[in-house]
Image: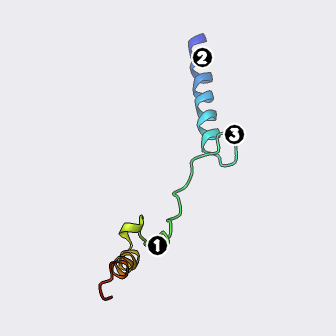
Amino acid sequence: MIFLVVLVVAIVVIALVMKAAASPGGPGGGLRGPRPPRGPRPQRPTRPLAPDDDPEFLRELERRARRDDGSPA
């Protein structure tokens, strides 16, 4: 008889815990729905990482070096 009472109490407790976990806004918060899809990431403009990667800088450096050498530009 006591076994039957313990079994019924255990089933009721399990049912209440499952219901509380599934209810939104409760302490458990419920299961979350799927995330909304993210939009495409905005592309950042690509730029040189260092001065020696920048073609404009290299051209200016070469122009200055030629001007300093006295050779025609």
Q: Earlier in the sequence, mark 2 or mark 3?
A: 2
Q: Is residue 17 above or below residue 8?
A: below
Quickly name the residue at label 3.
27
Quickly name the residue at label 1.
43
Tell me: 11 left or right of 50. Answer: right
Judged from the image, the secondary structure of the residue bearing numbered disc 1 is loop
Q: CA distance from mark 3 to mark 1?
A: 40 Å
Q: Is residue 11 above or below residue 23?
A: above
**Between residues 4 and 59, which one lies in front from this camera angle?**
59
User: Would you say residue 1 is visible in this rendering?
Assistant: no
x and y percentages locating residue 58 in the rendered image? 36, 75
Given contact means CB atoms under 8 Å apart, are the residues at marks 2 and 1 in contact? no
Q: Earlier in the sequence, mark 3 or mark 1?
A: 3
| Residue at image coords 36%, 69% | 53
x and y percentages locating residue 30 in the rendered image? 61, 46
- Residue farthest to the left, as pictured: 71
**Foreground mark, 2 or 1?**
1
**Between residues 33 and 62, which one lies in front from this camera angle?**
62
Q: Earlier in the sequence, mark 2 or mark 1?
A: 2
Quickly name the residue at label 2.
6
x and y percentages locating residue 12 in the rendered image? 62, 29
**Between residues 50 and 64, which one lies in front from this camera angle?**
64
**Quadrant (top left, top right, bottom left, bottom right) of the N terminus:** top right
| Residue at image coords 69%, 39% | 27
Bin the neighbour count of mark 2 within 10 Å (Cα to Cα): few under 14, some 14-19, many 20 and up.
few
Judged from the image, the secondary structure of the residue bearing numbered disc 3 is loop
